[in-house]
Image (tube, rainbow, N blue to C red):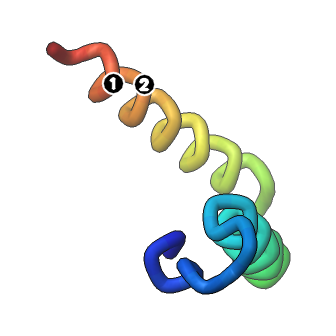
Amino acid sequence: MAILLNGTPDPDYTAHAVLAALSAEHVSALLPELGDKRIRAGLHHLTHAAHSNAQRP
């Protein structure tokens, strides 16, 4: 995403801002269908997997 936004003054910040807004919109749309427990469990699983992968040499 930062590569696509390379022409902005701060591509990393812009990418994070855009992705945060998209994520919030996505969660808001899915919350009534999936429920907060399932969304939280999915996020927990994702962060655990990312952390585990980061610990590998």
Q: Decide if residue 4 is on the left or right side of residue 23.
A: left
- Element under label 1? helix
Q: Amino acid at mark 2?
A: His
Dot 1, how many residues are within 10 Å of its Cα: few (below 14), some (14-19), or many (20+)? Answer: few
Mark identifier at residue 38: none
Q: Decide if residue 54 is on the left or right side of residue 27.
A: left
What residue sits right under mark 2 in the picture?
51
Q: Is residue 27 visible?
A: no
Q: Is residue 51 above or below residue 47?
A: above
The image quadrant where one finds the C terminus is: top left
Q: Amino acid at mark 1?
A: Ala
Residue 38 drawn at (x, y percent): 64, 53
Residue depicted at x 45% and y 75%: 3
Residue 7 drawn at (x, y percent): 60, 85
CB atoms at circles 1 and 2 under 8 Å apart? yes
Q: Is residue 23 above or below residue 45?
A: below
Q: Decide if residue 6 is on the left or right side of residue 53.
A: right
What residue sits right under mark 1 in the picture?
54
Q: Is residue 27 above or below residue 50?
A: below
Residue depicted at x 81% and y 75%: 21
Residue depicted at x 20% and y 17%: 56
- Asked which quadrant contains residue 44, the reply is top right
Residue 17 drawn at (x, y percent): 78, 68
- Element under label 2? helix
Q: Is residue 2 above or below residue 56?
A: below
Residue depicted at x 69% and y 81%: 8
